[in-house]
Image (tube, helix red, strand yellow):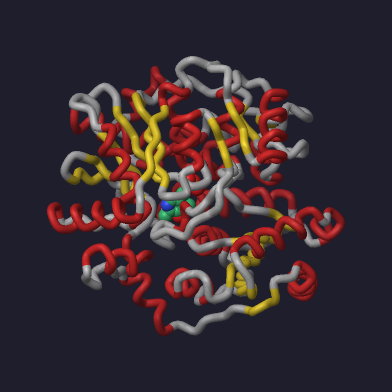
Amino acid sequence: MNYISTRGGGEAVDFQTAVMTGLARDGGLFLPSAIPDVRADLSAWAGLEYGALALEVMRRFADLPANDLRAMIGDSYATFRHPDVTPVVAVNSVHILELFHGPTLAFKDVALQFLGRVFAYYLAQSGRRLNILAATSGDTGSAAIAGVRGRFGLRIFVLYPHGRISPTQERQMTTVPDDNVFCLAVRGSFDDCQSIVKTIFRDLPFRDRYELGAVNSINWARLLAQIVYYFYGALRVMARTGARAVRIAVPTGNFGDIFAGYLAARMGLPVSRLILATNENDILARFFNTGVYQRGTVQATLSPSMDIQVASNFERYLYYRVDRDPREVCRLMEAFAQSGQLRLDRVRSAGVEELFAAGTCTTADALATIREFYGQYGYLLDPHSAVGVHVGRQFLSPDEPMLSLATAHPAKFADAIRQATGQDIAHHPVLDALANLPQRCTVLPADADAVRAFLREHIP
Ligand SMILES: *Cc1c(COP(=O)(O)O)cnc(C)c1O
């Protein structure tokens, strides 16, 4: 499979190049040059366990020897604490797809365990090395660290806002003892961290000299790993209920997770509705309900991993929405960069937009959903998963079951659970065990030169 840029520039590249470079040279995002149709395979896939299904899905996109791909998949998901990897649990009117059984208890492990191994695989072949520079407001940092810790040829430098992430999230990063892991607490905001990373990436001579790379959610391998659990969850629910199609609710921030679901639907998975669920940062829900994509200001909510205004993967969806016309993508993205607004006035690609439904969940709604699910069904939702369930329940249908994605273990957001239930019940032994471990981090000023100096000192 070859990969093309959403902005139409340059030649098609292979899987290795798409994964190792992340962003296309023309500033666009990589997409497969064709979407395979797997409808004829679905009945055979229905009984597969997670790893075998992952191999079937991924080998259609990744030009890797089957044995190597199988081994990487096997290793990636052996780190999960549940034999089903991503089990499906029926709770009242919804089926919950639990994506949080990985090393850091958030769904980002599904993609980053795999990505870390893909990086290591290609680096070992080429004899090169890669120094990952990332900014995090919480979940991404620890999942990325867990994906690359101890791996030969890789180092990771994670910037996070000093004193502004939860103590649990900080400990998940700073207690990792491997010497290829560097946690940098920046005296500033998450936006400062992100702008430092961008500044350093724009410094091309520095970037080349220090072999810097990225792990953010625009990397194609992350999306690829996420397509798998849509097949896994939907096929399980259809087998259990006898339904011929499912609806899927997805708590959304960067449009990465739900875009993987969109690709699964285009490959032929019978998804009749993809339900996009946002918290108060509702730029995407507004877009799907009005056709206008307009930047707002970020509000802090109980689901911080979705406190995002500009969704980096949205451009990929836009590409299909304008009938794969890269010039139109460029025009729209330029308009958005200049005015903070983008409007789709022509209704094109009939069928694309009918798939989506969208809604918003307020903080009060999320707290009420957590309280109800715990009180009435004994099931504890984390605040991100509660957003998906709340919005998903607005689109229930009598003959199509609702699958709702649970993206984090509630113990990661124990304060929100306490607020919802009045009880201190959200615990996980993995997180409790971090309390007494030594921490390692370096505090730096919010200044790109200070970070550059740190990198020079720690990259030989
Ligand atoms: C990152 C994250 C999300 C949002 O995922 P996107 O791919 O950005 O839409 C939702 N929930 C949790 C717990 C996350 O860590």
Q: Which residue is drawn at 61% across and 66% down?
A: 158
Taking the image as shown, residue 433 lies to the left or right of residue 72, namely left
Residue 385, image x, y percentages:
34, 50
Residue 73, image x, y percentages:
47, 46
Taking the image as shown, residue 365 lies to the left or right of residue 76, namely left
Number of labels in the image equals 0
Q: Which residue is drawn at 23% across and 28% down?
A: 397
Residue 162, image x, y percentages:
58, 74
- Whether residue 76 can be seen here: no
Report the quarter where the N terminus lies: top right
Report the quarter where the C terminus lies: bottom right
Q: Which residue is drawn at 47% across and 49% down?
A: 281
Taking the image as shown, residue 459 lies to the left or right of residue 192, namely right
Image height check: is 43 above or below 61?
above
Residue 189, image x, y percentages:
60, 67
Image height check: is 239 above or below 51?
above
Q: Which residue is drawn at 72% across and 56% down?
A: 198
Taking the image as shown, residue 398 lies to the left or right of residue 45, namely left
